[in-house]
Image (tube, rainbow, N blue to C red):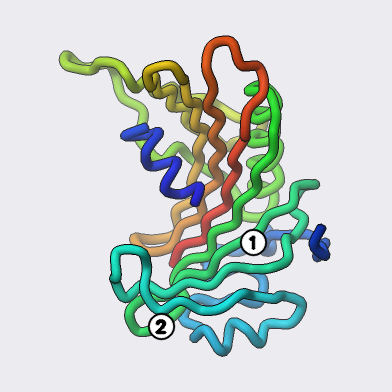
Amino acid sequence: MLRSTLVLALAASVPIISFLAGAPASAQTLDGWQGFKFGLSPDQARKVPGFQFGRYSRKNLMDQNQGAMASTKPVIINGMGFKFDLWFNAFERLYEIALQNQKITTRAECEIGFISLLATQEKAYGEFKPVYTARKAREGDQMPLAIEWRKAGGPSQYQLATAYMGFETASVWNARKVYDARHYLDIAAMWSAGSKTTQAVCLTQIDYRG
């Protein structure tokens, strides 16, 4: 899953549903995505019209009470096809919606796609900020991880983390819209390849958490 890959990088023919994603520009709260409201049970989530899912698993790979079910149809957001997972807590209530896209691109194309997606989501949700607050370099800071803080075309800002992992270098772009201690929206992308590789998988994710 992209979420796990992003964590590592910072440490390190199906039918398609097409629609405009996002919430009203004036939205000040985050209660889910489309018809998937936080707190739904798996059975209630299956009743949201226009979507299809595989089987529901009540436990994760660590045998923890964290349920999940995956979409069988991608959705189109900003010209990209996203498949997604619904995550449920121990009480089988929806608390996370994670959408993922994978595409072979150059690093530059991956970055452009991220910035374009961020601009689209900014229009719907407002200003995004980097996940980690910018700070000055400190004694003890060292590779293999470097973080830059950058400004997008609009008011939003994001961070670029570069992780040097042996024969590969990973680039991770990330921005977050925080609503409160529990609710936030993440936009992220990752591209990793060796020095002589020009094209690799660009992993892009939109993560709704509440």
The residue mark sitting in front, 2 or 1, is 2
Above or below, 191 relative to 168: below
Gap in angstroms between the C-alphas marked 2 and 1: 30 Å
The reply to whether residue 3 is in sight is yes
At mark 1, the secondary structure is loop
Residue at (46, 70) in percent of width and height: 87
What residue is shown at x 59% (from left), y 82% (from top)?
A: 45
Which percent across, then down, holds residue 173? Answer: 52, 33
Work out which quarter of the rendered image holds the C terminus and state it.
bottom left
Q: Secondary structure at mark 2?
A: loop
Q: Which quadrant would residue 105 be assigned to in this image?
A: top right
Does 192 appear above or below 54?
Answer: above
What amino acid type is highlighted by mark number 2?
A: Glu
Upstream in sequence: badge 2 or badge 1:
1
What label does residue 92 carry, if any? 2
As drawn, is 105 to the left or to the right of 162? right
Of residues 180 and 107, the one nearer the viewer is 107
Residue at image position (31%, 24%) is: 135
- Percent position (x, y) of residue 92? 41, 83
